[in-house]
Each structure stands twice: as C-alpha cells, then as structure tokens.
C-alpha cells in the first residue's frame, strides 16, 4: 500500500497489491491492537483441531465463556460417539483464581470420567490458567493413572501466540497420544488424512474416493476420529495433508518420528481434487491403482462438469473477495473460482504462511489485493474499491458482506453442506449461483 | 431449591450462560457513536463478535487490546493505549467502552488509571472512556450487562436541571421489544430517555453507504441528563443494588426508581401502565386498551391447549422471571425454571417464580444444560422456552423449543422477536400454544392407536 493510505500504520506491511510493489507481505505476526482483527486465540486454534475427535471428553479448564462459545458450533460429523458435541468446563470462579484451580480440575476429571467413561480426555488451558500457574501436566498425569485412561493437557492459553500456536498445541497433544515409538508393522496402501474435520461428511467423501482407488484411510486427523484409530496412526504408509496451516507441523513430526512421508493435497474444486488424487496414485505407483484412479476421475468429472458449466454461464465476469482462515483454502479458491469464470480481486487469510502467500501471489491477477489478518475496515474498503460482487468468509464476515450489498459464501466450520471433492465442487458452484444471482439484490439498488 | 455454586460443582456440562464481558458489550451497542475494546487476548473479542453476529445478523465490531505473552508478563498498558489509538483512527467514536477480561483482571490491570492517563496524554476531549471491570470468572453475561449499563450512566451522567423526561432502563431484550416500548411511550406522548437503545444499531435497516458505527443508540447528552429525570422505570428486578443503574440514579441524584419485571405477560404489562400512570398521570390510550382486550380474548381462546403445557424455562434471570409469569397466567405449568447465573438475585428470581400450586418444581440457579435435561426428564417437560442452546433438549429428549432471548443462532430473526406489551405477549403466547398444538397434531393419531387399538391390523 502507499504510505498514508491506511489509517493504521502497523497494518501496511500486511497488505500488498500484486504487481504494484516488490515488497514481501508480512504474516504470522501478532494482531495489531484496536484494529478489530478477525482472528481468534490459541485456545480456539487448538479446539478447532481437536474437537472432531468424537469419543474424547473435551474439558476446558477456565471460566465458563471459553466453553460456552465453543459448544457444538461446528459441523463435524461422527459415525460413532457424540461425546465431542458436549462442552465441559471447570467453570472457574473468583475463589479458584485466588487459591488455584488444580484441585477443582482433578475433581472435575474424576466426576466426568465416572459419568461418561471416555477413553481419552483433552484438558485445554485458557488465559487465566496460564497466569495463575496451575500445573496441568501434574494434574493430568495423576488423573490418567487414577482412571487408567489418557488425560492429555493442551497448552492453549489464549495469550501465548495467535491461532497458529493453537494448531501446534493441538498437534503436540495428538503426538503425545500416538507416543514417540514407531510401530514395527506398516499397512500397505493405508493413508492418514490430515487436516479434514469431516465438516458435513467431507472426510467420508474423500475416503470413498480413496477406497475406489484401492487405498484405505487409516485415520483422519481429526474428522470422525476416535481414540482407538488415532493411536494406530503410525501404521499408515502415507500422510496426505489438506489443511496445511493446522497440520503441516504434525505431518513433519510424523515423518521424523515414524518415517511416514507426506503429500500436500487439496480437495476443493475439480482441478485440485483431480490433481490430488493423481498425485496420491502416483505415490503408490502400480498400474492397478492408477487405472482405478483415472476411472474414478473420469466418472466423477463427466458427472459434475456439465453441472458446473451450467452455473458458469451466469457467473462469468463476476469478481470475488476471499477472506478465510488458512492458506490452502485460499489457494484452492482462486482456482475454483476460475473454474466458474470468476476472478478473485481481494484475498486474505487469518493464519496463512509465507510460502502460501507466495503461491497466492503467483496465482492472482495484477492488481489483486492480498492481505494477512485483515479487519472489517479493510475488508469493506477493498471490497468496495475493487468492486467485489461476493465475499467468501466466516460467520463474522457474513453480515458485513450483506450490508455492503454483496453476495456471500459460507466457507467455515459451521456449514451443513460439503464443499470437498467433486460433489462439493458442484455444491460450491450452486451456492455461488444462489447467492450472486438472487433476486434480492435488485431491490437494494432502488 | 437447588442452587449450585462454584464450590458445590466441579464441572459444568453444556453451559447455560456466557461470561461477563459478553453481557457488557451489549449496552455499549445501545449508546450513540460508541465502540468497545476488550482488554485481553484476541480470542475473547472474536468469539463474542461471532456469537452476536449470528444472533443479530449485523456486523459486530469489537476491538481487542490483543494481549500477548509480553503484555501479560510486563503489563498490558502499552497494548491498550495503542489499541485505543487505532480504534479512534478507524472508527472515530464518541464513547469507548473499555472492558476487562479474565486475563486483564488476573494480571491486575488498572484500567481506570490507564484510561484517564490516556485522555490526558493524547489531549482528547471529544471522546469519553467508560471502564467496566468484567472478569469472565466474576459472573455471568447477565451481571455483565447490568454492570456495563450502570458504568455508562455513572460515567456519562452529571448533575442536570430537572426535566420532564422519564428514564426507561431496559434489560437485554430484543431490538423489536425496545421498539415496542418506544411505540407505547410515543403513543402516550411521554417524554422519555430509553437506555440502552440498541433497537436500531443491532437491527439496522439496509442503507447505502455502509456505516462502520450504525446510526442509533441513546444520545450521550440524553444519558448525561438522566440525572434530572422525573423518574426511572427499570425493567430489572434481578439486578442487585450494587450493579443496578436505576439504584445508582436514585442514590446519586435522587431520581425516584420504579423497578419492575419486563412487561411480558398480562400482569407485567398491566404493571407497566400502572407505573406510567403513577409517574405521568396518563391513562392507557384507547388503542392499547384494545390490544389488551385482544390479548385477553386470545388467552381465553388458547387456555385449554395451554393447560397441556409442562414447561422448562431457562436463560437470563430477568427474562426467565417474566416468562414464568406468562406460563402461570395461562395455565402452563412451569415445572423446570433455570438460569446459568449464580448471583444471589438470580436465585431469588428463580425462587419467586415458584408456583404455589406446582408441587416439586425444579428451581435451578447456577446450572447447566446437562442438569436441566435431567430435570426435564424427571418432570416430563413437554415444551422448552428459552434461547437456542435449548435445541440440545430437542435433540436429546424430543422436547420442542420456543426460541426467545439470546443467543438465537440456529434460526433467523432473533433480533426481531417481539414479546413485550400486550401485542408482544400475544405473539409470544401464540408461538407457545402453536408449538404445543403442533406436537399434539404430530403425535395424537399414533399415540391413541398404540394405546387403545387391540384389533387386527387392516
């Protein structure tokens, strides 16, 4: 941005216009105070990643709010236990802050384990726990011994970093669950799928594809996962990583510890889905797998391409603004929008990484605004300046788009319809059509 | 009565309340040209914005001082001041609410000092800073609401010459409810200051161009002159004296206080008109009298259907109290009456909801949905009345839910739900009755068949 063109100087280094300047975008920094960042906290990052573990008891050690705002708000589906849909809290009170919350936490674990019999408890630390210095490790260790189950502390005090730090805390918790030892046996053609939270059954859709290719999903991190399946994760012969922002670290660690190689994939949009399936088939080699993969791709694309093209006619030439959580989603969306004839004129993420921003910069057209950790003022300004017809975002961004008279795509964890794979690509095109071409907009212009 | 406290209970399972800062944000949205900054880690502001955006379907901008590790160890003053700088640059507000959070309170931030120093440092005289200490562990969102409402009045009001206005202080009701109260006052030609007035700001009409701070809210000058009003009508009997804004005005400026329940239900609405008569000498207008008559007519029409109702009521203590009244006066038996708030006043409100003729009522304060669910089963509840989190009772126990209160995040139009006054009560009661009827119609054929039919299947 030109100097002085933004009200807040601290934000200038986090915004670039492609082609206008050579400088590199700065990301993964602390949010600027007072700017109304759209980011959440460390706890949020950890909870997002771990919550889909269906038979775990998710206990928030802290005041009631942190558990209240995260109770069953996401669309992760389960094929078994429903325990993950409950939100548990030690509901800390003033006296606990003064005298410490360790005893209460221990009693809470006892009480809840007795009632729900989970094989696994995640104990999330919150801001105050980090300050009053409760020894989460010790309490969890003792509780694990008492009940003979896994009780894993998640170091997610809100102030120790941004949402990405929470992803890392969650990955560390998962690593503890799997243990440091590599397993002697390795299942051939067995895949761990990292970074899919089974929103609206998306992990099931992808598992079905892989099965048709002659491969088996060992466990998904963490959509529809269970204690029993998670601890067997080290047996897989390949990790595929979709949401790299949250799971790249886990993939690296698993390669280090268990020698499992990994591939970055994305199942958003027809192009990326096809490319990812081919990449996986290529990894395993073998003409059988490759042939089945090509058959699958042909059947599915024959089915969906005409449907998607049907929408494309009405959408050609529209302009999109994108503001999502992670980089992988942003990258895929640029390509996916192209599939339906739409150009991305503004794009940003809450927690994208440097390498992802480089890819974004390579993909977008000249003049596209790229921004990290944006706020409502910036979203408003650039959407208006660039003439965006629609915004992709989460719950907080939705009303802003509508107030600006722009269409909106819900690409968040709350949605109830899948956007992954070939089915998801059709859903996406349909959703774009249903919002962009709605009759309501014409009444706003009067 | 079962009153669970932090000592008695080790874990909450599926909370029935939110935290103090959440409640504290809402009154600020009812002040003209106002913004809020939460002094704490970034997540608090984001979670609360998300929660509110889903309910109101409005952009909810709330800033954060985005405290990091350094700020937590060495003090967050620098972050807060920088946050105020940026907030002013971006929004240019007339009032800024500075709300603490768990983190700021625990590390002992002195926000009063920081705020007054900040104004001096920057030489600002066109913006007012209102500080509110609301640690998340200090109480529920209900107490946070009252504390912020009181703090705003305490900070902005000043000795003013006596005026003819009456103050109307509202609890956390819907924007539509606030509009209805204003309609009644306007119809009666009563001069008033209603506060906090988020009827436009949190339910704003579509206009271009977009405004970062929506138009509306109680004016700063109006709040300043609440001290000179003829009387205060506060719909807040569950606010304890230390956090009650009406008591503040009475104790500080001698403004007579009429503290009453939310005017939902016939009796409570009658009470409102009785108080208005007492304060202004004005009678109920003819058109309102007709609305009252229509409500009576409707109550008679529905009474036998309502008699089948065994209700569970939960949410903000103030709202729970009013809804329990609606149930009782219509022959619906409130068998479970619950709030997540642990305050003494909340417990008192729940206790006073007890119906003499209902043996073994479950009266729960400081509770959660796991407990409410157990009591619903025990008491054979067939209708739940409260905010959207009660969908848990629908999913687990098949109990239909009439949505009212906050948050309503799984349906549209929470901000437009009207329940106050005679007309509001009628629409609210219709929603309850029709929910009971819907269940009846859904179930009676196979229910009766299963119970009585013993012949051969055709």
Image: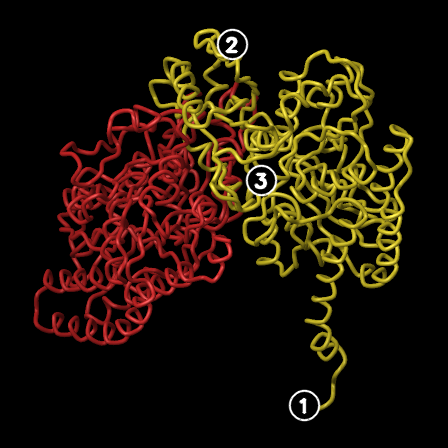
Chain colours: A red, B yellow
Of B221 and A293, the residue lying toward us: B221
- x, y percentage for residue B368? 61, 42
Q: Earlier in the sequence, mark 2 or mark 3?
A: 2
- The residue mark sitting in front, 1 or 2, is 2
Q: CA distance from mark 1 to mark 3?
A: 57 Å
Q: Residues within 10 Å of mark 2 (few under 14, many from 20)?
A: few
Q: Do the residues at pointers 1 and 2 share their chain?
A: yes
Q: Residue at 16% across / 51% down in the picture?
A: A262
Residue at image point 36% right, 52% down:
A389
Q: Which mark is residue B116?
A: 2
Which label was assigned to residue B202? Answer: 3
- Rounded to the nearest whole Å, what is the CA distance between mark 2 and mark 3? 29 Å
Kindly identify which numbered label has been placed on residue B457.
1
First in sequence, mark 1 or 3: give its number.
Answer: 3
**Horizontal side, residue A119 vs residue A20: left or right:** right
The residue marked by circle 3 belongs to what chain?
A: B
Choose between A94 and B229: the one closer to the eye: B229
**Given the image, what chain letter belongs to the residue carrying mark 2?**
B
Residue plotted at (81% across, 42% down) = B354
Res B7 visible: no
Is B397 positioned to the left or the right of A47 in the image?
right
């Amino acid at each position: 941005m030109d100097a002085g063109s933004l009200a807040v100087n601290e934000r200038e280094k986090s915004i670039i216009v492609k082609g206008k300047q050579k400088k590199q975008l700065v990301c993964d920094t602390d949010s600027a105070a007072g700017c109304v960042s759209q980011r959440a906290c460390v706890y949020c990052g950890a909870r997002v990643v771990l919550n889909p573990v269906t038979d775990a008891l998710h206990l928030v050690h802290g005041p009631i709010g942190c558990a209240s705002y995260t109770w069953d708000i996401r669309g992760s589906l389960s094929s078994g236990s429903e325990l993950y849909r409950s939100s548990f809290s030690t509901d800390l009170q003033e006296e606990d802050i003064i005298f410490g919350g360790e005893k209460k936490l221990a009693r809470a674990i006892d009480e809840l384990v007795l009632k729900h019999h989970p094989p696994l408890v995640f104990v999330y630390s919150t801001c105050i726990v980090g300050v009053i210095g409760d020894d989460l490790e010790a309490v969890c260790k003792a509780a694990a011994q008492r009940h003979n189950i896994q009780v894993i502390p998640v170091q997610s005090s809100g102030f120790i970093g941004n949402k990405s730090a929470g992803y890392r805390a969650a990955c560390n918790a998962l690593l503890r669950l799997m243990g440091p030892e590599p397993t002697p046996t390795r299942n051939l053609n067995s895949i761990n799928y990292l970074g899919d939270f089974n929103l609206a059954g998306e992990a099931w859709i992808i598992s079905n594809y892989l099965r048709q290719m002659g491969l088996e999903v060992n466990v998904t991190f963490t959509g529809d996962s269970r204690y029993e399946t998670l601890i067997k994760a080290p047996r897989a012969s390949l990790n595929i990583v979709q949401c790299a922002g949250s799971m790249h670290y886990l993939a690296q660690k698993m390669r280090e510890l268990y020698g499992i190689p990994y591939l970055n994939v994305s199942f958003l949009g027809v192009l990326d889905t096809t490319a990812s399936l081919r990449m996986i088939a290529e990894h395993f080699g073998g003409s059988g797998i490759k042939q089945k993969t090509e058959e699958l791709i042909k059947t599915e694309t024959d089915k969906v391409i005409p449907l998607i093209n049907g929408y494309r006619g009405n959408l050609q030439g529209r302009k999109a603004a994108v503001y999502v959580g992670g980089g992988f989603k942003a990258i895929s969306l640029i390509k996916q929008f192209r599939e339906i004839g739409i150009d991305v004129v503004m794009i940003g993420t809450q927690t994208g990484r440097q390498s992802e921003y480089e890819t974004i910069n390579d993909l977008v057209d000249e003049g596209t605004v790229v921004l990290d950790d944006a706020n409502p003022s910036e979203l408003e300004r650039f959407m208006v300046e660039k003439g965006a017809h629609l915004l992709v975002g989460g719950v907080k961004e939705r009303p802003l788009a509508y107030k600006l008279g722009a269409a909106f795509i819900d690409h968040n964890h709350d949605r109830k319809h899948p956007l992954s794979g070939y089915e998801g690509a059709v859903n996406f095109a349909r959703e774009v059509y249903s919002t962009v071409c709605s009759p309501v907009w014409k009444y706003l212009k009067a | 009565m079962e009153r669970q406290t932090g000592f008695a209970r080790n874990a909450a399972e599926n909370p029935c309340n939110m935290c103090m800062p959440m409640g504290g944000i809402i009154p600020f949205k009812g002040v003209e040209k106002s913004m809020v900054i939460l002094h704490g880690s970034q997540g608090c502001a984001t979670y609360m914005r998300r929660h509110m955006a889903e309910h109101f379907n409005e952009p909810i901008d709330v800033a954060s001082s985005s405290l990091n590790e350094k700020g937590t160890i060495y003090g967050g003053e620098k972050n807060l001041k920088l946050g105020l700088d940026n907030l002013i640059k971006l929004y240019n507000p007339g009032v800024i609410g500075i709300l603490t959070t768990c983190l700021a309170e625990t590390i002992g931030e002195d926000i009063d000092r920081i705020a007054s120093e900040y104004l001096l440092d920057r030489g600002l005289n066109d913006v007012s800073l209102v500080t509110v200490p609301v640690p998340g562990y200090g109480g529920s969102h209900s107490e946070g609401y009252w504390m912020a409402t009181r703090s705003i009045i305490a900070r902005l009001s000043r000795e003013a010459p006596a005026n003819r206005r009456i103050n109307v202080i509202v609890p956390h009701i819907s924007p539509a409810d606030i509009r209805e109260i204003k309609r009644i006052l306007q119809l009666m030609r009563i001069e008033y200051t209603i506060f906090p007035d988020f009827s436009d700001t949190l339910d704003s009409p579509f206009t271009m161009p977009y405004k970062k701070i929506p138009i509306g809210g109680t004016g700063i000058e109006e709040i300043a002159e609440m001290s000179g009003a003829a009387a205060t009508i506060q719909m807040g009997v569950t606010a304890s004296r230390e956090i009650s804004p009406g008591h503040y005005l009475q104790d500080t400026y001698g403004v007579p206080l009429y503290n009453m329940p939310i005017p939902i239900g016939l009796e409570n609405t009658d009470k409102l008109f009785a108080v208005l008569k007492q304060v202004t000498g004005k009678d109920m207008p003819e058109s309102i009298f007709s609305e009252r008559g229509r409500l009576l007519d409707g109550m008679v029409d529905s009474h036998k259907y309502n008699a089948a109702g065994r209700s569970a009521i939960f949410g903000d203590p103030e709202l729970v109290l009013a809804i329990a009244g609606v149930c009782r006066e219509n022959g619906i038996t409130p068998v479970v009456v619950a709030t997540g708030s642990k305050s003494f006043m909340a417990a008192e409100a729940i206790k006073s909801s007890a119906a003499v003729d209902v043996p073994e009522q479950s009266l729960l304060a400081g509770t959660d949905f796991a407990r409410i669910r157990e009591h619903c089963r025990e008491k054979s509840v067939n209708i739940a009345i409260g905010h959207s989190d009660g969908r848990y009772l629908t999913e687990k126990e098949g109990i239909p839910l009439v949505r009212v209160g906050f948050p309503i995040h799984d349906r549209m139009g929470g901000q437009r739900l009207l329940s106050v006054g005679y007309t509001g009560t009628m629409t609210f009661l219709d929603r309850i009755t029709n929910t009971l009827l819907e269940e009846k119609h859904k179930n009676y054929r196979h229910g009766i068949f299963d119970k009585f039919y013993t012949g051969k299947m055709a």
